[in-house]
Image (spheres, helix red, strand yellow):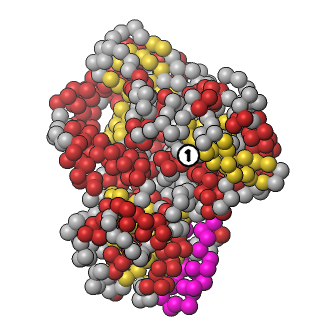
Amino acid sequence: MVSDRAYYSDTIASFLSRDDLTVLGELTAASEFDVDLPQRDAWRQEVRVLRSALLAFNDGHVFLEFVVPRLGKRIDAVLLLHGRLIVLEFKVGARFFARADIDQVWDYALDLKNFHETSRDRSIWPGLVITGNSGRLAEGEERAEDKVAEPTLVSSDRLGEWLARVSGSRAEEAPAANEWQRGRYRPTPTIIEAATSLYRRHSVKEIARHDAGAKNLAQTSAAVARIIESSRDNGWKSICLVTGVPGAGKTLVGLDVATRFQDAESELHSVYLSGNGPLVAILSEALARDKVQQERRNGRTMRKGQARQAVQAFIQAVHHFRDEGLKDPLPPADHVAIFDEAQRAWNLAKTADFMQRKKGRPGFAQSEPDFLVSCLDRHPDWAVVVCLVGGGQEINTGEAGISEWLAVIQRSYPKWHVHLSSQLTDSEYNAGAAIDALRVRSNVCFDDDLHLAVSMRSFRAEHVSTFVKMVLDRELSDAATLYRQFARRFPVVMTRSVETARAWLRRQARGNERYGLVVSSQALRLKPHAIDVRAPVDPVNWFLNDREDVRSSYYLEDVATEFQVQGLELDWVGVVWDADLRYQDSGWQHHSFVGKRWQSIHKADRQLYLKNAYRVLLTRARQGMVIVVPEGTEQDPTRDPAFYDGTYSYLRSVGIEELGCP
């Protein structure tokens, strides 16, 4: 029978009593896509293998083609046997166990463990089954604390033998099958997974968690949609500012709104824009690759170039939008523009300098926020600007911060309606004076639904971003207290050795969980550790390519900086801390390496950028993090141990565990 999550669901006894054609008919009827001959034959062989393997079992349940929403895939089979979950991936005709297939079934098991409520407390045993060989059985061990075993590699003729072993040891209380499958699925996808799912026209409700402890992303997305629709209905021009802590889902809200109003023929058509070049490149490539794969699965051919063109209508670099506005004085095609990381838009000085040097326009008198709003203001009827804003995220010279957007609206656009997150008054947004100036206007309102307060990036611990803020703000006691609350769920460890950190990252990751090393763009004295921050890194290859590619993050050779990882995340992160930001008794000391020596940074804005760079680096992990503070050496005056020891001692005083040698 068809279930809520699986194409086919039945007791083992009933499954064994049905013939192949009946089961195949139910699978085919439930499929969302046309079932071709190879798929039908694969299902037929899987059913026969399962029937043979389950003959000795009287109790239990079978789920075939169990849907995993976050991954956009289906598990071939899930078995409930004596209270245990058996997750099976079949490779019909395969003679060998491929690494990619092993990681695939491990990912399925981890996804159920992390995001499916009724699987959370159960032992889960993933198994990869090949049908093109015989006599093979390499049992995975249950080593991890979360009770997810390593994948078992088994040929179809020995599947029943393995199932008997697993189900016969330490039986657990069996859940009701209907209760188990109806358990809420509360995923926390990466931004790449989320963008891919949204681009396939899934809604944010399907891919975002819904627990009471986190602001529902759908609620914030709906609030923005209401502002857009009311502006259209009333002929208003509006600006909407959405805030959130690092990893709270601001980008996801923007992508959801863009996909909700993706119809190019609709007057509500929206465009998602970002000044974060690596983020745009990575998301665009991920969406194009996925589109090509989707077409291939459906028996159609699409070149990646075609897919990229389609993606460009969905996500664009903000500079392309700006340049089009310079060339064409008419209103843009879109009535709604969503600016991600709006705090990074350029101030007047940087914009004017760029326009003179690159565009041949001397005397340009508008900041980037001013010019972008002016482009939307060209519409004679209505328009909406949505700004997605991160606090403490300005990391480069010339970034205007959110106050410039507010100052522009107050100075030049008195008739625009202003919708502000109620948390925009927080000190980390540095917009207090600009907000005070706006309060006298009657068309300004504050909305709690425009703030995302809890980080979604780390599904193991929601308050990592708060912990990082406390550490950087020298709130030692509060940071230590918060660390103790999440340390078991979200490991943060320390070492003086880069090699020890590399070994730790490799040990932690399971399946396709991604890991990598990140450093500050000012970390210029890590070369003795084989880390050259000036070596060019392609963020697309670093973030998207698999573990067989030396350019990927998995190799732990190339490192990414705050500019390449902002807005993105990894499952496991190694942060290598150089002497650019040092802790001394008087507080943080800020330095840049010039020529052959470190020089102190005295300008307040550059000090802020450096502090924010480490804020970005320390909030990229979804599951855990290792921090490396090298020991330095007295033989090298640019790596004096005194440059590093204060930082290491300060971080250890928070309570962070120290790793031993690998």
**183 above or below 133?**
below
Q: Position of residue 358 (x, y in %)?
A: 35, 61
- Neighbour tally class for label 1: few under 14, some 14-19, many 20 plus, Cα within 10 Å: many
Amino acid at dot 1: Ser
Foreground: 199 or 499?
A: 499
Residue that appears at 36% across and 78% down: 374
**402 above or below 291?**
below
Q: Position of residue 94 (x, y in %)?
A: 31, 18
**274 above or below 124?**
below
Image quarter of residue 460: top right
Q: Is residue 84 left or right of residue 42?
A: right
Residue that appears at 42% across and 85% down: 413
Name the element at disc 1. loop
Per the rendered image, the range of residues in magenta is 428-456
Q: Is residue 582 left or right of residue 195?
A: right
Q: Image quadrant for the N terminus?
A: top left
Image quarter of residue 577: top right
Please say whether residue 9 is one of the residues in the magenta stretch.
no
Q: Position of residue 174 (x, y in %)?
A: 55, 35
Q: Is residue 576 left or right of residue 136?
A: right
Q: Residue 344: tell me if it is visible.
A: yes
Q: Image quadrant for the C terminus?
A: top right
Foreground: 269 or 380?
A: 380
Image quarter of residue 474: bottom right
| Residue receiving disc 1 | 521
Q: Position of residue 344 (x, y in %)?
A: 49, 62
Residue that appears at 35% across and 18% down: 130
